[in-house]
């Protein structure tokens, strides 16, 4: 596993996110909310910029969301 993008290290730059993450399959995303809660998700579907987006569905239903925080 490797870190593709960090919002804090890239000044929340969306262009940099897509530069690093576009067309990458099987990603895990972690987010810390403004309330300190850690949430995330997994998807086998690659990230794509909205102007390049094709309709792709997870027919195998492998994508999921999760919470890491217990508070």
Image (cartoon, rainbow, N blue to C red):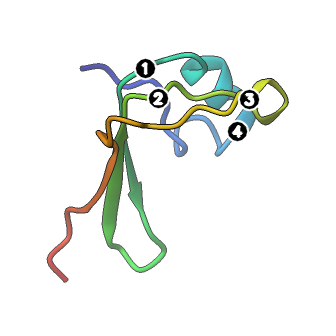
Q: Is residue 54 above or below residue 63?
A: above
Q: Is residue 34 above or below residue 22?
A: below
Q: Residue at x 70, y 38 (%)?
A: 13
Badge 4: residue crowd in 10 Å (few <14, some 14–19, many ≥20): some
Q: Residue at x 48, y 17 (%)?
A: 24
Determine whether label 3 and label 4 are within 8 Å by CB: no
Q: Which comes before the other along the chain, label 3 or label 1?
A: 1
Q: Nearer the viewer, mark 2 or mark 4?
A: 2
Secondary structure state at the residue bearing disc 1: loop
Determine whether label 4 and label 1 are within 8 Å by CB: no
Secondary structure state at the residue bearing disc 2: loop
Q: Which comes before the other along the chain, label 3 or label 2?
A: 2
Q: Which comes before the other along the chain, label 2 or label 1?
A: 1
Q: Which mark is residue 25?
A: 1
Q: Residue at x 41, y 56 (%)?
A: 31
Q: Which comes before the other along the chain, label 3 or label 4?
A: 4
Drawn side of residue 50 relative to residue 23, left or right: right
Q: CA distance from mark 2 to mark 1?
A: 5 Å
Secondary structure state at the residue bearing disc 4: loop
Q: CA distance from mark 3 to mark 1?
A: 14 Å
Q: Position of residue 32 (x, y in %)?
A: 40, 62
Determine whether label 3 and label 2 are within 8 Å by CB: no
The residue identified by callout 3 is 53
Residue 68, by quadrant, is: bottom left
The residue identified by callout 2 is 45
Q: CA distance from mark 3 to mark 2?
A: 11 Å
Drawn side of residue 4 relative to residue 14, left or right: left
């Amino acid at each position: 596993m490797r870190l593709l993008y960090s919002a804090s290290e890239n000044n929340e730059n969306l262009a940099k996110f897509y530069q690093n993450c576009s067309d990458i399959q099987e990603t895990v995303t972690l987010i810390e909310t403004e309330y300190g809660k850690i949430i995330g998700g997994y998807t086998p579907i690659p990230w794509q910029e909205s102007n390049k987006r094709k309709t792709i569905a997870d027919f195998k239903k492998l994508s999921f969301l999760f919470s890491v925080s217990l508070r």
